[in-house]
Amino acid sequence: MKLQHQLGGLEGLDGPIDFEKRVFVQDWERRIFAIHAAMMGLSASLREAVPDYDLDAVPTAFASTWTWADLRKGAESMNPLAYFQYRYYEKWLGGITGYLVEQGYLSQDELDAAAERYRNEPDAPLPDRDSQPIDDQVIRYLREGDSPRRGPAKPAFGVGDQVIVGDPPRAEHTRLPGYLRGRPGTVTRVFEGNYAYFCSTGPDGLGEPVPVYIVRFEAEDVWGPRAEPNGGPMFADIYEVYLSPAKSTEQNQEGSS
């Protein structure tokens, strides 16, 4: 991921971090979360979901694909300075509204006019529509979801295998933490089945369903001399497309001879 999304190991970030313990700090954040959940529950991607969702029976004008990947891409495409400037759900709001304008569900002028109205009249009523069938679909999605598992797997690695994390070209979105690129690790678990992601990440390599592993990384292999003494290992779930076999000591000696 881009630097503003994966800060682990960067210099100058050694001070204490203040984690916000509350899920929602302000009431409007709950609404942003609900809008995202509703878009996920009405997403065209559910036509291929493991549960059989009948989206044609839902009276909604929303006919696009919206997933966690789309939300993440909106945040990861932000200017790094803007990323640090805005609160968590402000990033969500920017990504969602930008997507809706881009997809043609409303114009920028309509968005600006609505924002101005509710800024001046915070208690102004929302549009009144019969939303019960939509609500039923969204609630069903929240309960049943969409399994990312897609059929049996033929994993290339087994428990105990030594692997190296790749360094694929940067894309607009990735599921590979930046601080693990090029690091050696050991497979500690192979998940059953292949697993898909919400979208293809292009040159990053993630597309078709693939096996997923839990890989163990030693602290000194990840952080080098900055690793804390006696620091324990870390574990990460990693798609197979990001892994390669680690060269053995004999292979390294042959390659240098």
Image (cartoon, helix red, strand yellow):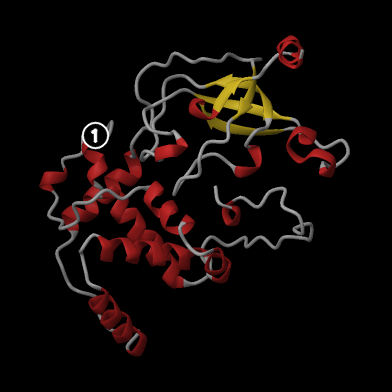
- Residue count near mark 1 (Cα–Cα under 10 Å), binned few <14, some 14–19, many ≥20: few
Residue at left offset 39%, top offset 39%:
202
- Name the foreground residue: 233 vs 79: 79
In-image side of 226 versus 53 (left or right): right
Residue 208 in view here: yes
Q: Which residue is mark 1?
A: 48
Q: Amino acid at mark 1?
A: Glu
Where 76 sits versus 211, above or below?
below
Residue 102: quadrant of the picture:
bottom left
Where 240 sits versus 14, above or below?
above
Name the element at disc 1: helix
Q: Position of residue 132 (x, y in %)?
A: 18, 57
Where 109 sits versus 59, above or below?
below
Extreme-right residue of the structure: 229
Q: Position of residue 49 (x, y in %)?
A: 27, 34
Residue at left offset 69%, top offset 27%:
184
Residue at left offset 55%, top offset 51%:
2
In-image side of 163 versus 91 (left or right): right
Q: Position of residue 235 (x, y in %)?
A: 65, 32
Where 208 sits versus 85, above or below?
above
